[in-house]
Image: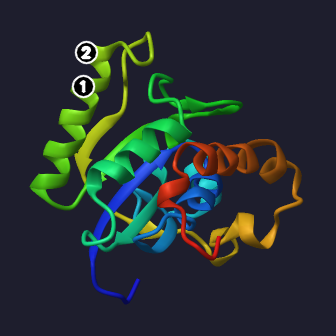
Amino acid sequence: MQQTGQTITLGGGCFWCTEAVFVRVNGVLDVESGYCNGQTQQPTYEQVCTGGTGHNEVVKLLYDPQQISVREILEIFFVIHDPTSLNAQGNDHGTQYRSGIYFSTPEQQQEALALIDELTKSGAYGRAIVTEVLPLANYWPAEGYHQDFFEKNPHQGYCMAVAAPKVAKFRKTFARLQKPDR
């Protein structure tokens, strides 16, 4: 992540799926899969998968606020995962799959809390939103083979069953925010 812009980090289940969507979002300059808000320094995927490190599988987004707002990023995030499912997304279970927004500015925190409040009051999900909103802490990039996983492995079973439908949902719901080359 060498470009300039702002960063926000999101946990919405398996990072392969979340990354597959956000690389297609206009104004998102870079997406990096990683782990955050746990206790272990430089955790490995295998360690995180045990649930013992406290880390969450996340994507760190570098975005241009002149092209896309935090609100728009968060609206996409809330459409492509289930924010009411505690420590699970689909068949993926464990604290490493928890719903989380890890902010890097007070404005991002305020926007996240305001949107969660709005969604809660509207009854959009019919259940309580369990998304944690915390400052980003102890972030580590995931191993190289996790980066751009969907792009490199679109026909892998998990990608076809889980990531591809999320990408399709993004394309249908947020066509106006899709990068022209995607």
Residue on which the image places disc 2: 121
Residue 84 visible at all? yes
Residue ID at (51%, 49%): 174
Amino acid type, residue under disc 1 in the picture: Glu
Name the quadrant containing residue 61: bottom left
* Marks 1 and 2 close (CB-CB < 8 Å): yes
User: Picture coordinates of residue 104 (x, y %)?
Assistant: 21, 61
Q: Is residue 121 left or right of residue 2?
A: left
Name the quadrant containing residue 148: bottom right
Amino acid type, residue under disc 2 in the picture: Lys
Q: Nearer the viewer, residue 80 or 87?
A: 80
Q: Is residue 139 left or right of residue 91?
A: left
Please identify the residue farthest to the left as the structure is shown.
106
Quadrant (top left, top right, bottom left, bottom right) of the N terminus: bottom left
Q: Secondary structure at mark 1?
A: helix
Q: Nearer the viewer, residue 63 or 95?
A: 63
Q: Is residue 111 left or right of residue 12?
A: left
Residue ID at (32%, 70%): 67
User: Picture coordinates of residue 62 (x, y %)?
Assistant: 37, 72
User: Picture coordinates of residue 3 (x, y %)?
Assistant: 35, 88
Q: What label does residue 118 carry, if any? A: 1
Residue 53 visible at all? no
Please count the marks in the image: 2
Q: Secondary structure at mark 2?
A: helix
Mark 1 and mark 2: Cα distance apart in space? 5 Å
